[in-house]
Image: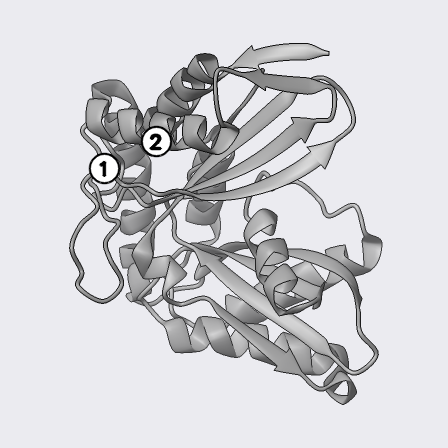
Amino acid sequence: MRQISTEKISQAVRDLAIRANVELGEDVILAFEAAMEREESPTGREILKRLIENAKIAREQRIPMCQDTGFAVVFVELGQDVHITGGSLRDAITEGVRRGYEEGYLRKSICHCITRKNTGDNTPPVIHFDIVPGDRLRIIFAPKGGGSENMSRVTMLTPAVGIEGIRDFVVQRVKESGSNPCPPTIVGVGIGGTMEQAAILAKKALLRPLGSENPDEELRKLEKDWLERINRLGIGPQGLGGRITSLAVHINMMPCHIASLPVAVNIQCHAARHKEIEL
């Protein structure tokens, strides 16, 4: 049995919150560079160039790459042989978020749904827990901006629409989103499960590194096809026209009920931020 203290967890989450907001992943930078080679619009190429420069400045000066430093979304894989000492795991993560957003001078964007009063410290976070074998604790911190999250949707399709119906829903969602999610985007798609599970599948799909292949051959083909269709929409970087509307489509799928076909689209803006640690 491995013991991990709540203080160690809080400090780790605090560091992840700051790093995620100031250090854009190398996979995203490489995707920007590859996109510049394919983008035919001069304005689109200039935007991609500025995004690369922006990421460099953010890393070097330790300032957020975007003013919307996001809802704190945390994915936790808790080994079944881990014992948390000193208090609650949820409370420890929440404290880490509070410290990170205060000490990192990150914008606090979380408010009461009705009164709109700000909570003042970007808490509470959204936390997804998975119990897994082993004696390790893995934490993935993924700040999610409001502009891209607002463009995400879940629907319950009829099974009769088939794969074409799913494809049409995904492409139409990107088309209707237009410039709102700050393209070039990553499109996370969750298929199957139940209504809420499809949404989680879609969000988890955004954590997959850009440039990596889907291990499922069928889904790999769909990702390529749907990305090509999306990039024929002409929305382009920041919605100002061009070939590169999205950098990738990532799909997760699981079985569903015989009467249902849940589909979720979770759109990620160009600031595809997530950092992780294993304790």
Q: Residue at x 58, y 34 (%)?
A: 76
For mark 2, does the 10 Å Cα neighbourhood hold few (<14), some (14 to 19), or many (20 or more) residues?
many
Q: Position of residue 274 (x, y in %)?
A: 46, 35
Q: Is residue 65 left or right of residue 138?
A: left
* Disc 1 + disc 2, Cβ < 8 Å: yes
Is residue 237 visible in the rendered image? The answer is no
Left or right of 3, for residue 104: left
Q: Name the amino acid, label 1.
A: Asp
> Compared to 210, does 243 lie above or below?
below
Where does the image place residue 50, in percent across and percent down from the top left? 26, 42
Q: Which comes before the other along the chain, label 1 or label 2?
A: 2
Percent coordinates x, y for residue 7 in the rendering = 42, 14
What x and y, as percent, mark residue 58? 25, 28
Amino acid type, mark 2: Val
From the image, tell me which residue sits under label 1. Answer: 121
Q: Identify whether 241 is placed above or below 110.
A: below
Determine if residue 217 is in view. yes
Quarter of the rendering occupied by the C terminus: top right
- The residue positioned 78% from the left and 88% from the top of the image is 160
Residue tagged 2: 97
Which residue does the image show at 60% across and 64% down from the upper left?
196
Decide if residue 237 is on the left or right side of residue 167.
left
Q: Quadrant of residue 193?
A: bottom right
Q: CA distance from mark 1 to mark 2?
A: 8 Å
Task: Kindly identify the residue that appears in the image at 28 percent across and 24 percent down.
Answer: 99
SS at mark 2 in the image: helix
The foreground one among 252 and 112 is: 112
